[in-house]
Amino acid sequence: MTKPIVKKVVVGPIQTNCYVVKCPETGAVLVVDPGDDSSAINEYFQRLDLIIYTHGHFDHVGGASDLISRYSPETMIHSEDVEMMSSAKLHAAEWGFSIQQPPTVNRILTNGDSIKVGNLVFSVLHTPGHSRGSICIKGHDLFFSGDTLFAGSIGRTDLPQSSPANMKTTMKNIIAEQEDSFVILPGHGPASTMKNEKKNNPFLRFL
């Protein structure tokens, strides 16, 4: 099995984890959540084929515009977060931050979709809770969890378009059913494993 090359780049004032994912066989590159600091992200590739946003919050989309202008990658987000993303610049301003508004995406994602990055194949899980259209991306023993699942915690559910009830359902019916071997690469903070989170994360341990 092809093993992805993954580089984490921590960007922006909210310390968002952006991931550069490269297929070693073809050189194809996927960027997950380019939230800010496009120049820092761009240090790790000379081509960019795809951008995936795990959700539409400004700290996960705010660095995309420059990358899109330079490389014209295919861009993707879940259908339920299209509206949120379209107002990302406004929402950033409400929090006292400034971003470039990213353009409309090329592809609308739904649960179960496959995403190819060269010879790499990832699948989409719709995981509402932190936002209506939050997704996780899994494949090759990796689990990009966005702001759904963190090491020892979960994403906030007190924001507009968040839902504690949806998050609980996501944890019980989706996250808890994932393979223990997955390395969790979250939207903020350190990496973990699914096995460790099932054992120690209080939001999963008592399900």
Image (cartoon, grey):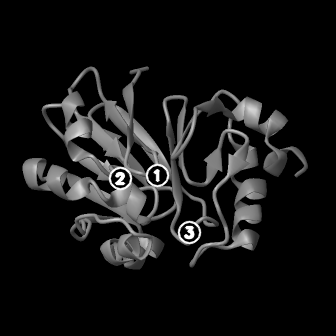
What x and y, as percent, mark residue 16?
Answer: 45, 47
Viewed as shown, does residue 34 lie left or right of 3?
A: left
Closest to the camera, between mark 1 and mark 2, is 1
- Asked if one can make out residue 79 in the rendered structure from this viewpoint, the answer is no
Residue 138, given in percent of the width and then of the height, sits at: 52, 41
Element assignment for label 1: loop
Q: Earlier in the sequence, mark 3 or mark 1?
A: 1
What residue would you read off at disc 3? 131
Mark 3 nearby-residue class (10 Å; few <14, some 14–19, many ≥20)? many
Residue at screen point 64% across, 31% down = 192
Dot 1 surroundings within 10 Å: few (below 14), some, or many (20 or more)? few
Q: What is the three-letter code of the residue carrying label 1?
A: Ile
Residue at the left extreme? 70
Residue pictured at 33% horizontal, 35% vertical: 20
The answer to which of marks 1 and 2 sits earlier in the sequence is 1
* Residue drawn where x is 57% and y is 78% of the image: 160
User: Reading the chain from its start, which is encountered first: label 2 or label 3?
Assistant: 2
| Residue 109, label in figure | none
Q: Which residue in the protein does label 1 denote?
A: 14
x, y (%) of residue 25? 25, 21
Mark 3: which amino acid? Answer: Ser
Residue placed under numbered mark 2 in the picture: 35
Provide the secondary structure element on which disc 3 rests: loop
Distance of mark 2 from mark 3, alpha carbons?
16 Å
Q: Is residue 153 visible?
A: yes
| Residue sitting nearer the eye, 12 or 60 | 12
Question: In the picture shown, does residue 112 fall above or below 189?
Answer: below
The part of the image, by quadrant, that contains residue 84 is: bottom left
Figure quadrant of the N terminus: top left
Instruction: Give left or right: position of 84 versus 99.
Output: right
Picture layout, residue 27 above or below residue 92: above
Residue type highlighted by circle 2: Gly
